[in-house]
Image (cartoon, rainbow, N blue to C red):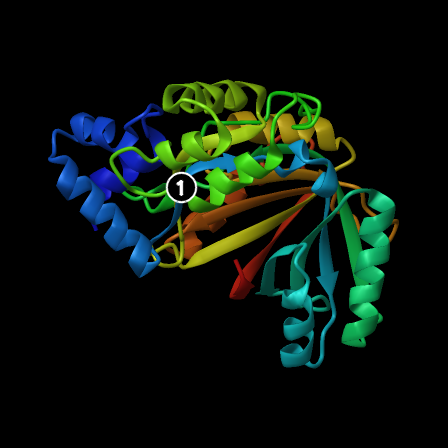
Amino acid sequence: MDRELLMKAQYEMPLGESPFYDLAEKLDKEVDYVTAKLREYLSAGVVKKIGPQLNYRAFKGVSHAALVGVQVDNLETAVRIINAERSVKHNFLREHEIYNIWFTIKAPSEKELFEKTEDLMDRCGVNNYIVLPSVRVYKMDVKYDLFKGVSYSPRTEAEKDVPKVDDLGLDGRMLRDMERNFSVEERPFRKFAEKYGYSESELADLISELIEKRVVRDFYAVLNGQNAGFKENGMNLVRTERPEKVAEILLKEIPEITHLVQRDVPENWRYPVYFMVHAVNRDIIEKIADRARELDGVEELRILYSLKSFKD
């Protein structure tokens, strides 16, 4: 892989009318080489997508989310049913003595989260599961340092609340269209400008403004960690009586975190803080976990490693 190209496309992707031309200038390479390589990585699955990445909390129809841990005996049947649910985004087989399947689900309200999950579990024939709604997202930024072999990003969620797309008077369909269909071409904003009645420069400026508002998380190349060599990911569960304080310390001290979420937990589940780390091997993740265990307020930390991704 051209690691320098993929690093720039993740961390320093220019935002303008011709972002790939500007990226080539940053790299001091021909634009044809840059676009050909990025198309190659997209085709090979090393890069999942490029362009604006939206913050789901800015959309009223999917503004609530939960992590669900499930005890599953018949994996094949349960995975098929869970993956068929459109509001499920991630679904992993993880190392845990009881709950082996862990997936995320979204809904317009917390009440609907529980109702939707209950219906899904009934259809799976499952009766032992936990639903852990998100209280606050402190960080959600999946980037990979291809030189150090570990995830890394200094970006955090500065504000608890995110403005809603509807309240800003924006067309949510346009934003979703750009997220899903942004192409590697000379003028990638042109087709959206013609379709929705903007100029190309206006759309680039709009995305920049929405990044500031956190409606758009970032504008960059999203890598597939597994295909880029990051074979291990660990979901770190933190037991603490001070989840807000611990989350703030984790943000400051451990930039290798990709996701950091405080969750509402039932009485029989002791872990209100969750963070993800991706790496080329488990030793790196274990060393980061050891750093986290030394932080003030962390009473216990355990890692649930991913054994298989069923939906990503």
Q: Residue at x 38, y 24 (%)?
A: 200
Residue 112 in picture, x, y percent from top left:
84, 50
Q: Which residue is nearer to you in this view: 220 or 253?
A: 220
Give the crowd class for mark 1: few <14, some 14-19, many >=20 residues within 10 Å.
some
Mark 1 = which residue? Answer: 182
Q: Residue at x 68, y 62 (%)?
A: 85
On the image, which quarter does residue 189 sit in? top left
Secondary structure type for disc 1: loop
Looking at the rendered structure, the kind of residue marked 1 is: Phe
On the image, which quarter does residue 243 sit in? top right
Q: Which residue is nearer to you in this view: 203 or 122?
A: 203
Above or below, 55 against 99 in this view is above
Residue 166 in picture, x, y percent from top left:
69, 27
Q: Residue at x 29, y 29 (%)?
A: 19
Above or below, 206 against 288 in this view is above
Residue 298 in picture, x, y percent from top left:
67, 37
Residue 129 in picture, x, y percent from top left:
79, 63
**Number of labelled discs?**
1
Above or below, 48 against 61 in this view is below
